[in-house]
Amino acid sequence: MKPKPDDRSDNVERIQENINHTIENIRKADDMIEKTSDDTMRKNLIEKNDNREDALKGMRSEIRDEANARKNGYQS
């Protein structure tokens, strides 16, 4: 059986959707941080947002790479 060819044509859009979703989660968590009086929950939400910020850096780098690859016709 032959593997499916690599279809990267929508990678930029999918990564952008993930970025948007992650930013929305950061905003929601920030709202919860402001409203909660539970120190443990606040700490967990802050840690999650730190992880999300790190993930955003990676996704932004990846979207630049994919955009460049698209511009160059996905040539290696």
Image (tube, rainbow, N blue to C red):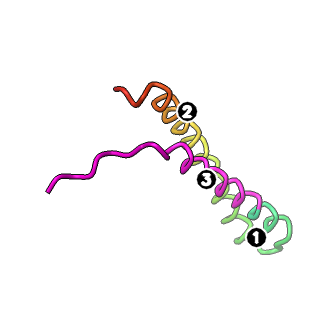
In the image, residue 24 sits, relative to residue 59, either above or below, namely below
Q: CA distance from mark 3 to mark 1?
A: 31 Å
Q: How many marks?
A: 3
Disc 2 residue type (three-letter) = Arg
Name the residue: 59% across, 53% down. Answer: 18
Name the residue: 83% across, 74% down. Answer: 37
Q: Given contact means CB atoms under 8 Å apart, are the residues at marks 3 and 1 in contact?
A: no
Measured from the top left, where is residue 40 in percent x and y? 70, 71
Residue 51, can we see it? no
First in sequence: mark 3 vs mark 2: 3
Q: CA distance from mark 1 to mark 2?
A: 38 Å
Disc 1 residue type (three-letter) = Asp
Q: Quadrant of residue 44?
A: bottom right
In the image, residue 15 sits, relative to residue 36, either above or below, namely above
**Which residue lies under the disc numbered 3?**
17
**Which residue lies under the disc numbered 2?**
64
Name the residue: 42% across, 43% down. Answer: 8
The magenta-colored residue range is 1-27
In the image, residue 68 sits, relative to residue 4, either above or below, namely above
**Which residue lies under the disc numbered 1?**
39
Measured from the top left, where is residue 46 in percent x and y? 70, 59
Q: Given contact means CB atoms under 8 Å apart, are the residues at marks 3 and 2 in contact?
A: no
Camera-near label (1 vs 2) is 2
> In what quadrant of the picture does the C terminus appear?
top left
Measured from the top left, where is residue 35 in percent x and y? 85, 70
Residue 42, can we see it? yes
Q: For residue 75: magenta?
A: no
Side of 5 relative to 32 (left or right): left
